[in-house]
Amino acid sequence: MLRSEKEISVKVEQALELISPLVEDNYVPLNIQSLASLLGVSRNSVGRVIKQLIDGGKVEKQGSGFNLIPTRSQYCIS
């Protein structure tokens, strides 16, 4: 699914959203190099997208990984 996605920003954001619920506190324990390797994307491209996500308030850097900041829709109960 992620490897076939053409849009790099969508690919990175979806990967973070898929990984974060598996680990405590929405923490993604992957650095840029590991995430790039996992997705088959260049480190520069992943770094650029991560910077945009940090600037947009969707992700924050934490230790050697990233913390996905939950959106309001993630708090809604269906």
Image: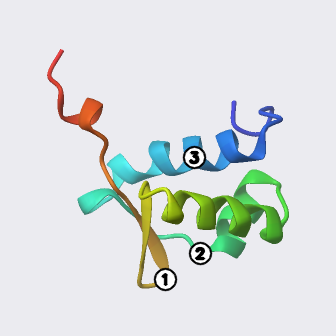
Q: Are marks 3 and 2 in contact (CB under 8 Å)?
A: no
Residue furthest to the bottom: 63
Residue at the image point whose x is 54% and y is 70% from the top: 30
Where residue 58 sits in the image (x, y, percent)?
A: 43, 54
What's the residue type where badge 3 is placed? Glu
Q: In this view, does 40 lie above or below 44?
A: above
Q: Is mark 1 on a helix, strand or loop?
A: loop
Q: Are marks 2 and 1 in contact (CB under 8 Å)?
A: yes
Q: Is residue 33 above or below residue 71?
A: below
Where residue 31 sits in the image (x, y, percent)?
A: 59, 75
Q: Is mark 3 on a helix, strand or loop?
A: helix
Q: Of the residues tagged 3 and 1, which is closer to the observer?
A: 3
Say left or right for 46 vs 78: right
Q: Do the residues labelled 3 and 1 touch (CB within 8 Å)?
A: no
Mark number displayed over residue 31: 2
Based on the displayed image, in which of its 4 quarters is residue 41 positioned?
Answer: bottom right
Where residue 5 sits in the image (x, y, percent)?
A: 77, 33
**Callout 3 environment at 10 Å: few (<14), some (14 to 19), or many (20+)?**
some
Q: How far apart are marks 2 and 1 (CA)?
A: 6 Å
Q: What element carries label 2?
A: loop
| Residue annotated with mark 1 | 64
Based on the displayed image, in which of its 4 quarters is residue 26 positioned?
Answer: bottom left
| Residue annotated with mark 3 | 13
- In this orientation, which residue lies closer to the viewer: 63 or 38? 63
